[in-house]
Image: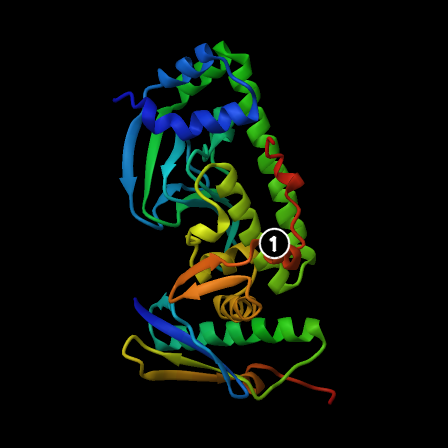
């Protein structure tokens, strides 16, 4: 097992933004035993029904949480960015109730669940940060229900992309116009309850409206303010600290 | 598994699929295109208009056409 505090940096920043942490608390997080692993895109990290003994932190790359319908249809329920803890609920529940999968090549840090539990037992403010993380997750899920349930296909896609860009910017990954979105058309389709062909068509419209730029398979937000208007996007539900 | 590309043809406007999707064989690709056609039509219906002349053309990795699904054939319309 190796201790790699630098690789926990984004995780620490994220927790500290959720709940202020002292230097002592940050140092305590740095003592967590971690096992690093590099994986390819579309690797299953957690499978529904599995018993979990390690907590997974996303260090680099992107991931999603999803569930499968009886006929094999995948519904992505959230996307995840570096710094995210992918399965904080497994601190308290033994069995996974959903799947976690990478959407790009990724670097993961695995922490034994016991060690993470001891950390939260010993440091209530760290526990509070994780609690807030769960609450933000829940808020995002509510917005996704609204998105898939009531918004038009184009607005759904635009909103989902805006959310991703806003979260990535808050995490220090870069401003919306400057990075390529890591999801495939299929990922976007599975996140919005559409097919990839429909998504492609909507992306063409968004491109014609000048709010996204497409170069081959790359998608970039080209006009962030206009994109937010089309998406009916307001970031309050993300509870991002000012 | 092979990669198939689903190009949407809407009365002269083509939305090219630059990513494709991995599927077991051409008949799975045709079934996938059928589902996609119905999904696109569902979106049109919600907008209040539907064109049955549109189609999805499925190409394989070499650019060869392996299937074509017209919107008209993807739907059983009655009561017109």
Q: Looking at the image, can residue A54 be seen?
A: no
The picture quadrant where one finds residue A125 is top right
Where residue A4 sits: x, y (%)?
30, 23
Q: Is residue B25 above or below residue A117?
A: below
The picture quadrant where one finds residue B44 is bottom right
Chain of the residue on which disc 1 is drawn: A
Where residue B1 sits: x, y (%)?
30, 66
Residue depicted at 61% across the width and 54% down the height? A225
Local secondary structure at mark 1: helix
Where residue B7 sits: x, y (%)?
44, 78
Q: Is residue A15 above or below residue A235?
A: above
Q: Residue furthest left?
A: A1
Residue depicted at 67% across the width and 59% down the height? A151
What colouring method underlies this structural image? rainbow
In the foreground, A227 or A25: A227
Residue depicted at 73% across the width and 89% down the height? B80
Q: Give the crowd class for mark 1: few <14, some 14-19, many >=20 residues within 10 Å.
A: few
Q: Is residue B52 above or below residue A188?
A: below
Q: Residue furthest right?
A: B79
Q: Looking at the image, can residue A32 be seen?
A: yes
Per the image, the residue denoted by label 1 is: A225
In the foreground, B67 or A51: B67
Residue depicted at 32% across the width and 69% down the height? B3
Q: Is residue B12 above or below residue A5?
A: below
Where residue A153 sits: x, y (%)?
61, 64
């Amino acid at each position: 097992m190796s201790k790699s505090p630098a690789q926990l940096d984004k995780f620490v920043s994220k927790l500290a933004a959720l709940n202020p942490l002292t230097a002592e608390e940050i140092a305590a997080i740095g003592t967590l035993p971690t096992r690093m692993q590099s994986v390819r895109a579309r690797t299953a990290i957690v499978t529904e029904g599995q018993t979990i003994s390690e907590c997974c932190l996303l260090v680099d790359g992107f991931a999603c949480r999803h569930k499968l319908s009886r006929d094999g249809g995948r519904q992505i329920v959230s996307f995840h960015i570096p710094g995210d803890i992918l399965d904080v609920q497994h601190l308290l529940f033994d069995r996974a109730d959903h799947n976690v999968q990478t959407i790009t090549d990724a670097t993961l840090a695995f922490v034994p669940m016991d060690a993470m539990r001891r950390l939260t037992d010993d440091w209530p403010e760290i526990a509070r940060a994780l609690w807030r993380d769960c609450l933000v997750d829940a808020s995002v899920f509510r917005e996704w229900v609204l998105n898939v349930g009531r918004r038009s296909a184009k607005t759904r896609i635009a909103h989902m992309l805006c959310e991703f860009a806003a979260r990535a910017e808050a995490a220090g990954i870069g401003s919306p116009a400057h990075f390529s979105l890591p999801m495939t058309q299929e990922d976007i389709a599975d996140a919005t309850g559409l097919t990839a062909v429909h998504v492609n068509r909507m992306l063409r419209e968004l491109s014609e409206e000048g709010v996204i730029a497409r170069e081959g398979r790359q998608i970039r937000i080209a006009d962030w303010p206009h994109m937010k208007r089309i998406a009916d996007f307001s970031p309050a539900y993300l509870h991002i600290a000012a | 598994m092979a990669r198939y590309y689903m190009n949407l043809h809407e009365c002269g406007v083509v939305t090219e699929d630059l990513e494709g999707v991995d599927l077991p064989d051409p008949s799975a690709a045709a079934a996938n295109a059928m589902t996609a056609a119905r999904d696109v039509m569902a979106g049109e219906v919600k907008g209040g208009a539907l064109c049955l002349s549109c189609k999805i053309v499925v190409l394989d990795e070499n650019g060869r056409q392996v299937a074509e699904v017209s919107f008209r054939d993807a739907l059983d319309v009655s009561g017109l």
